[in-house]
Amino acid sequence: MHWADVTAQALAHKGNKHIISTGITPSGEFHIGHLREILTGDMISRAAKNAGLDVDFIFIVDDADPLRKVYPFLDEEYSQFIGHQIGSIPAPDQQGKPDFEKFSKDGLSYADYFLNPFLDALRTIGVVPRIIKNMNSYRTGEFNEVSKIACDKAQEIREIIERVSTRELSKDWFPWSPLDSKGSLEGVVVTGYEYPLVHWKDSHGVEGSSDITKGEGKLPWRIDWPAKWAWIGVTCEAFGKDHGAAGGSYATGREICQLFGQQPPQPLTYEWISLKGKGAMSSSSGNTIGPIEALELVPPEILRLLIAQSKPNKAIEFDTGMSLVNLADEYERLLSRDFDKELVEEELSRRKRVQIEDAIGALSMSKVSQDSTFESSNVPFRHLCLLAQTKTSDEMVWKSLGYSNEQKPPHSLVDRLNKMKLWIKSKHLPEEMRISIVDNPTSETFTEFGDDEIKVLIVLKKELESCEWNIEEIGNAIPNSAKSVDLSAKIAYFVAYNSLMGRSRGPRLAPILAEIDRERIIKILEKCLTVINS
RNA sequence: GGGCCUGUAGCUCAGUCAGGUAGAGCAUCCGGCUUUUAACCGGACGGUCGCGGGUUCGAACCCCGUCAGGCCCGCCA
């Protein structure tokens, strides 16, 4: 059973109506890691719907959170907004300076600036959650009831947090963070509470009162989270392992939410996605790959597969190089399998059956739309990558794949080719996938060369000097260079690939060479001989 | 200190919740496709399931211990 179905089953035992929640603070550029949050929730929602449950899938945008610091991608001008809610400050412009004009004219906030492209990416990837913006919820009074309970039960909440998280809260700690005279949540000391007002004194020495029913502040995170569960009625939430650790915010939240008269949601802790060799993704360090960027390179199904095929507790290592290639090939393989046939196979061990069922689940969860039918193109990613690099026009790619004017390639394949071309142009294409002629051969290339190889190389150079410079003739010249000295054609290919591309295997050479000047090729072969002789 | 996760073929990992003959892909090698598209097709090679104990007719799987790696407990998913 797919992991999402397992969670859905647990939910089914609890009832028929479920609100599955996800939440992110849009404090910077979104990355693939954030996608795991949303997709994990999305996949549970799907599985729950398939199980016949009534599901509401929501995405809470934590735009009531304060700006923590001036991130590297921001101008120093942002220091005036530290502590201010990111839903209430201007978005950065090209230079990273606050764009006051856009803020006052279009109301584009810092949070929206990062959120909007992410929502676009979500649509592309087939995720359409109900969006709840936190700051607005405070301002419109959605938090009224829970905020009042939190303030009334300040002592009980303090006890829970101190006991469960084993950290000591300061004397003037209070379960409400008021906005100060400048609009910041930082450095404000609560001096008293009379519903609905929380009295405070800020770092500028100014005193004032915050009306908790009007969003003049917010609940601190550890209370804000269970408060949301309560007023929305969340029954299931997937969250990152940072929240799931012992003494973490889920541990305190599950107790606090009962003060609000709400049972804690079904939890699902997921591992982080790290960038291969570079550690965890982080918006502030710039160590990210955005979903938008990734969607330019591969079809959305492949990003879904990344999340679908790994269980949530499995850490994912990701990069836009070979990981993506393998993932894309894996997807094509899944598509071309005939599961019905595999499942009727007799003498199927339980193990084997589980494997097939998991593959079916992963594939089904990778669909952008539940009812979309798959178009299996049967063209592996690697192969398409090769064709895109060697063929001079799209028509030639289609011809090579057996399509014609009568039988046009499917739309999905055309889309994939276009993405492939972008990928090839980008910095993300791994070197081992890139086809390139090596103009300056090095001695390491020829360590495996013996007398036969050298002999063939000499003949090859002669053949290429004299043959007609077209695909057919070049195609003949390569194997002939070995056959004419009574050696296997295999050696000729080995020699040709090593000499011209610096590797022992490769794509069909003739069409590539035909695109290049003969003199350049001959010159390279001459250099090879020089290197070998030295 | 407390807790979580991971350890299975050369590599990436399924399989552990519901114990029943050790799996896939990649890589490698061999063969086929009347001289390789990094394609495709067929086959082969390859594992004391980290280690030690226990439960069981039977353990990769359950229990106890242990080693190694990664991570979280400061509002970064």
Image (cartoon, rainbow, N blue to C red):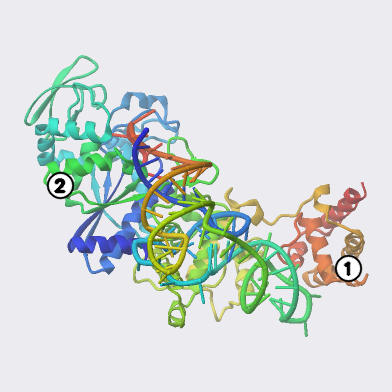
**Which residue is at a point 27% across and 29% down the rendered structure image?**
A167
Badge 2: few (under 14), some or many (20 or more) residues near its Cα, within 10 Å? some
Determine the CA span between mark 1 and mark 2. 79 Å
Residue indicated by mark 1: A481
**Which residue is at a point 80% across and 52% down the rendered structure image?**
A445
The N terminus of chain A: image quadrant: bottom left
Three-letter code for the amino acid on which mark 2 is drawn: Trp
Name the side, left or right, on which A438 lies relative to A529. left
SS of the residue at dot 1? Answer: helix
Badge 1: few (under 14), some or many (20 or more) residues near its Cα, within 10 Å? many
Q: Chain of mark 2?
A: A
Name the side, left or right, on which B46 lies relative to A110. right
Which residue is at the front of the view, B71 or A185? B71
Which residue is at the front of the view, A359 or A417? A359
Indicate which label's residue lies in the foreground, 1 or 2.
Answer: 2
Among the two numbered marks 1 and 2 on one chain, the one whose residue lies closer to the N terminus? 2
Circle number at residue A231? 2
Residue A228: % across, % down: 19, 45
Q: Is residue A122 above or below residue A77?
A: below
Residue A256 visible? The answer is yes
Name the side, left or right, on which B51 lies relative to A93. right
Residue A488: % across, % down: 85, 71
Residue A329: % across, % down: 54, 64
Circle number at residue A258? none
Residue A385: % across, % down: 61, 62
Three-letter code for the amino acid on which mark 1 is drawn: Ser
